[in-house]
Image (tube, rainbow, N blue to C red):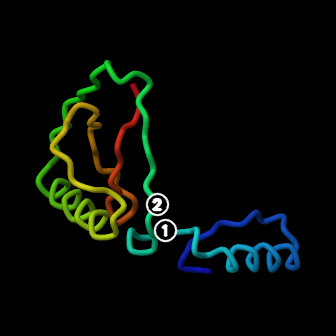
Amino acid sequence: MVKYKFDFCKKLTPEQRRELMLVLYRNKDVFARTIEDLKTYPNFELKLQPKSWDVKCYTRQYKLPQNEADEAHRQILALCSRELVSESVDTTYNNPAFMVKETEVYALCVTLGE
């Protein structure tokens, strides 16, 4: 459990801490630390429906520094290989991506607002 870096409340008794750790350990598959840890379900595809089909929603991509662009590309390829995303040439409903630095690694983020 140390590798997940959970920070437990200091007020928990040893028994409460052990019980909480046991619950977390039993459900460890829901705490993905990398893209490779994500679980997928065969033949499941989420249908995203915009509020209105006649409203276009093109948003310009943020310019990324080269090292972040390379890492974003690597992560997108990993998502594609796990079939979590697929390539599309339709930019009608695109959203910009950016990178957030988490300690030593970057996390790919996509803004879904607006």
Q: Which residue is nearer to you in this view: 48 or 78?
A: 48
Disc 2 crowd, CA 10 A, few/some/many (<14, 14-19, 20+): few
Q: Position of residue 35 (x, y in %)?
A: 38, 68
Residue 67 is drawn in which quadrant? bottom left
Badge 1: few (under 14), some or many (20 or more) residues near its Cα, within 10 Å? few
Q: Residue furthest left?
A: 66
Counting every numbered tag in the picture gives 2
Give me the C-alpha separation between circle 1 and circle 2.
6 Å
Q: Nearer the viewer, residue 34 or 95?
A: 95
Name the side, left or right, on which 31 lies relative to 11: left
**Residue in the image at 62% along x and 69% along y:** 6
Q: Which residue is mark 1?
A: 41
On-image quarter of the N terminus = bottom right
The foreground one among 110 and 7 is 110
In the picture as drawn, the residue positioned furthest to the front comes out as 43
Q: Position of residue 26 (x, y in %)?
A: 70, 79
Above or below residue 11? Residue 113 is above
Residue appearing at x 43%, y 40% in the figure = 48
Q: Amino acid at mark 1?
A: Tyr
Q: Residue at x 31, y 63 (%)?
A: 79
Q: Between residue 100 and residue 41, name the one nearer to us.
A: 41
**Residue assigned mark 2:** 44
Dots 1 and 2: beta carbons under 8 Å?
A: yes
Q: Position of residue 113 (x, y in %)?
A: 41, 30
